[in-house]
Image (tube, rainbow, N blue to C red):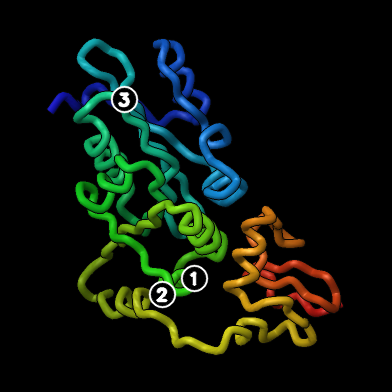
Amino acid sequence: MPFSEERVSGPHSEMEAKKIFTDAGREWKTRSERYKPETLKNTIFEEVSGQWWVAKNEKGIPVASQGIGTFEDVYLLLGLHSVEKGYGAAMANYVVDKHGDKPKLGAASSSGGKHIFPNKVGFKKLKFKDGFLVGNEDLPTEVKSALEKALQANSLPIRKIYWQDSSQWFVLLKIMQPPERKNPFSMYEGSEGHAPKADQKQQQKISYAKNEKCDYCNNVPVLDCRKCGQKLCRKHLIKPCR
């Protein structure tokens, strides 16, 4: 395999990684340039601070990079870039293996990423029901919303679990167990008085199509109140009807 750890540098900032490639005459796009409104644009995956590692070939030319960021208690994959065969999976594994103390989440959009991460890096495909993420109750709301948004654009949401030790198996089982399903409006508890225009699934799709944002953050709304006009994401459902 042409990949060699001796030819990997990092961590770099996003702009430093871009400069390494552009100085060698190769294109490299930042997240703001890559992400589309229907995928991870304006989500925590774009907003979080990140670090990048860059691999070069035998001639010293940059050929692959992998970005990763930390948000609360999880790692977020910020993009795998590879322009020569044999570097993609190796680059991803190199960076993922350096970050072993938290769960790792991502949304693969390219055909290469959809193949590499589940088959060669040990990630699992996340499960969804009616457009909502099943289980994974340990994830921050911002991450869940971003993954649900990416799913709508045919990206592949993935996760790699950090196994602390065998004594924690029951915690991991609890995390991955699907929660009890309630009626569509049960999540509006704590925000009494709201009059939803649609159930959460329908509203989320409507909001995606209109590129609407929560009144209190950049997440996609799951509630559009007929009475007060507020648009709320899952994190801010506790806001009362005005």
Determine the CA span between mark 2 and mark 1.
10 Å
Callout 2, which amino acid? Gly
Residue 196 horizontal side relative to residue 204, left or right: right
- Quickly name the residue at label 1: 132
Callout 1, which amino acid? Phe
**Looking at the image, is 236 positioned above or below residue 214?**
below
Which residue is at the far left? Answer: 1
Measured as percent of width and height from the top left, residue 199 is found at: 63, 78
Q: Are marks 2 and 3 in contact (CB under 8 Å)?
A: no
Quarter-wise, where is residue 81 in the image? top left
Residue 132 horizontal side relative to residue 184, left or right: left
Give the residue displayed 43% in from the left and 57% down from the top.
74
Q: Are marks 2 and 1 in contact (CB under 8 Å)?
A: no
Q: In which quarter of the image is the N terminus?
A: top left
Residue 59 horizontal side relative to residue 229, left or right: left
Closer-to-camera residue (199/167): 199
Determine the CA span between mark 1 and mark 3.
34 Å
The mark that comes first in sequence, 2 or 3, is: 3
Give the residue displayed 85% in from the left and 75% down from the top.
228
Give the residue displayed 62% in from the left and 47% down from the top.
42
Q: How many numbered discs? A: 3
Callout 3, which amino acid? Val
Q: From this viewpoint, is residue 207 visible?
A: yes
Residue 9 horizontal side relative to residue 187, left or right: left
Quarter-wise, where is residue 235 in the image? bottom right
- Quickly name the residue at label 2: 135
Q: Quadrant of the C terminus?
A: bottom right
- Quickly name the residue at label 3: 83
The mark that comes first in sequence, 1 or 3, is: 3
Q: Is mark 3 on a helix, strand or loop?
A: loop
Q: How crowded is mark 3: few (under 14 residues within 10 Å), some or many (20 or more)?
A: few
Q: Is mark 2 on a helix, strand or loop?
A: loop
